[in-house]
Image (cartoon, helix red, strand yellow):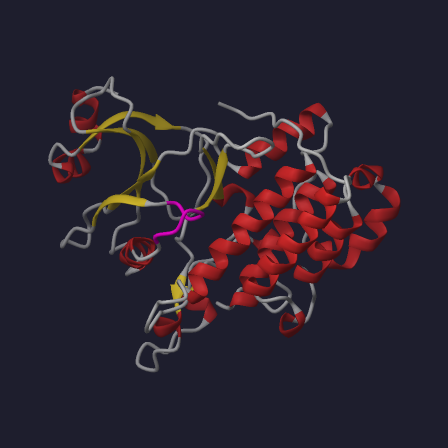
Amino acid sequence: MSKKYATEHLPEIYKSMKGRWTISSQLDGVEGFFNRGIFLVKKGKNITGEAKAIMKRLPTEAMQPSYARREITILAGLNHPTILQLRDSHVPEHPHETPWMVTEYCEHQTLKDLLQTYQIENRMVPEAFVWHVFDSLARAVHFCHHGRGSSKNWDPVSHRDITAFNVFIKADPTEEADTYSYSIKLGDFGCAITQSEWTNKVLDLAVEDLPEVDWDYRPPEGPVPTEAGDVYQIGKIMWCFFYLQTPDKNAVCSILTEQKRRPGHKKYSKELLEVIIACLGKDPDKRPIAYDLIKTLLKERLALIKDGKMKFEPLTLLD
């Protein structure tokens, strides 16, 4: 994308970037109700450099009051290896000008892309990688709701829209044998809200006042901002991996019958299915909290490896 294109079609963004970023191209086919365009950008004016990042145009204050500022503020406070990192942002003073944010670049796209690759090839995703994804998302949700152990006055964040399309895969080189060299990054906090804002009596917010989430991932109790709701959505993603298919609104009701009619699950362990079912419990009070989920995943995964029931297999990824 040339400087001429940027100045003609994105004049507000081009001006507000102040030379910090150069737009390389626009990414097509990117879903999301609250993005007004996704762009590949480079640091500074070095278009041929390797410092890639992703820029997202956000809705103006006139279109969606406080949504852009909320997403940027929340993401700025979440510094964790399993959460997409914010690199830069701009919230204009004028309500009709366009806000934007820049996040780290994940070269292997999303979990949805990965699932589609394996669906086309009719192959199951390696179980070792499925556990890796499961653990990464549990850690991301635990951090969102509780911060680090030393965090004081932490304001819990409910993501509310954890879907396969909002989880990214980033190269993360490692020298360890039998270890995947990919980081799993939870992103797109456009539907997220902090506990302090949700419980603010002056604002008096209701679920209807919040951004609408993906219906295929809605918990049975509705899209209320809770840790239990985020854990349910993790379970829904893992359900998609387990059965190698797109989400089903009735997954909780059909999961046991799916076991009998879909043979693909036999390649996975019963331990994996049991943890998935626990996350998909209809009663939010009976679902595991993220911390307990992390402990369970670690214990079960190590036992499977020790017993020789789960071996490392290479992964097929989109570049």
Instruction: Work out whether residue 31 or residue 83 is closer to the camera in this orientation and state it.
Output: 83
At x 32%, y 73%, the residue is 153
- Residue 145 visible in this rendered orientation of the protein: yes
- Is the N terminus in the top left, top right, bottom left or bottom right quadrant? top left
Instruction: Work out whether residue 302 or residue 22 is closer to the camera in this orientation and state it.
Output: 302
- Specify whether residue 107 is painted magenta: no
At x 50%, y 34%, the residue is 182
Instruction: Work out whether residue 144 or residue 204 is closer to the camera in this orientation and state it.
Output: 144
Give the image quarter of residue 311.
top right
At x 69%, y 54%, the residue is 276
Whole-percent x, y for residue 33 in the image? 43, 47
Number of numbered discs on residues: 0
Image-based side of 20 in relation to 199, left or right: left
The kind of secondary structure the magenta stretch mainly shows is loop
Whole-percent x, y for residue 176 in the image? 53, 33
- Residue 158 visible in this rendered orientation of the protein: no
Give the image quarter of residue 123.
top right
Extent of the magenta region: 79-84
Q: Is residue 228 above or below residue 319?
A: below
Image-based side of 307 in relation to 227, left or right: right
Whole-percent x, y for residue 305 in the image? 71, 42
Name, please, the residue furthest toward the right. Answer: 260
Whole-percent x, y for residue 45 in the image? 16, 24
Q: Is residue 248 above or below residue 253?
A: above
Q: Is residue 244 above or below residue 224?
A: above
Name, please, the residue furthest toward the top. Answer: 48
Image-based side of 116 in relation to 318, left or right: right
